[in-house]
Amino acid sequence: MRLPTPHKPAPVRTEQIILFRVSGQLFAVSSASVQEVRGVDSLAGSAKEIALPDLPKVKHCVRRGENSLYVVNAAMHFGLHPAPPALVFVLRRTRTALLIDGIEKMTTMTRLQALPMAFCHEERDWYRGLTALDQAVVPVIKPEGFLTPDQLFSLDASLLPREPEDHSADEDSSSSTELTQ
Amino acid sequence: MTLIADTELQSFVLLRLGDRRFALAAAQIAELVPPSRIFHFPNRTPEIEGVLLRRGRIVPVCDVTEKLIGKTLRSRRFYLIAQRCYGAQTEWIALPVTGDCELINAEMTLSSETDAPHVGGWLSHAGDVIEVLNLAALTPGPGEVLPALAPLEPQEART
């Protein structure tokens, strides 16, 4: 006689996350999305300054092989009161390095709830969803949501070496003005 | 023989905001819960105050008081959790209320073009004329929702 095989409950799918703080606010990011965690001081020598008036949240970039990584101040991105950041997350498969205050802990989430539809503005690009941990609700960030393609384009353009000003064009135009007169 | 047009009667929940009462179709109501902790996180939807955790679900809290009575009220007695439709998708939304709620049966008069968008109809009850709220006009949501893009069930975490 063959006994029925005992029913095994389906394994709960989990995802490892890092809980971190920005200006006192708790956020989560999938640990698979974080390529590297560095101290802010370690960037000091290699970071190049950027000043785009429309994009104050990015003040530095770091050269990584062929690409430039843009250092985004998370507090400014989320509209929080700025606090001196201590750490940088280099986010995988993005060109973003994120300035944060500190890491709270690593843990696992078993459920990611989609952001409620009532949230209908920029936050839809910021978060993958929300998760409940220890009777608290934590937003789970979307790594690609910090810089839009347009913003990356502007940042890349700002790094291009500027051509020296060509005054010959002015001379040409003045001469053509003379000609037309 | 007298025929009573009971088929026209519908169930409504009356909710109180300050001195005024409003109504929601009872079929839209999930539950009435005591005040609980609201969790805040950065967002750009000012109408949403935060979220609360209820039976494992994360429910956005939308204070509609200012829109309906023109002032904010600090005192809250309950959260009325209602279903809000976004196209083919339905989600819970919590509305803070300042007093007891009451279940009634009444006949609804449909709203007219001159009524505010948040008015779905009118009830006459105990000498009062009461607005039946249209949550889709009262609470925030995307202008158009593509059902194919909107997940019907909460997402599960991916490994």
Image: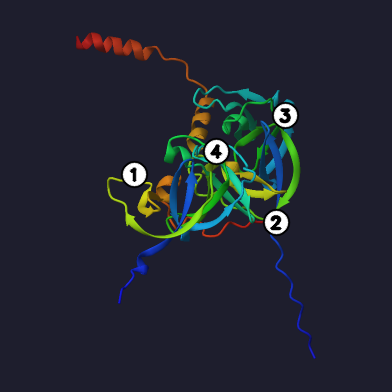
Towards the viewer: A178 or A81: A81
Mark 1 Cα-neighbour bin, 10 Å: few <14, some 14–19, many ≥20: few
Towards the viewer: B146 or A53: B146
- Quick one: SS at disc 1? loop
- Amino acid type at mark 2: Thr
What number is the disc on residue B116?
1
The residue most toward the left is: A181
Please check whether the numbered discs 1 and 3 fall on a single chain. Answer: no
Distance Cα–Cα, label 3 vs label 2: 29 Å
Q: Quadrant of the C terminus of chain B?
A: bottom right
Distance Cα–Cα, label 1 vs label 2: 46 Å
Label 4 close to label 2 by CB (< 8 Å): no
Please check whether the numbered discs 4 and 3 fall on a single chain. Answer: no
**Protein chain holding label 1:** B
Determine whether, in the image, residue B123 is placed left or right of residue A131: left
Q: Which residue is mark 3?
A: A86
Residue B71 visible, this angle: yes
Q: Which residue is mark 4?
A: B43
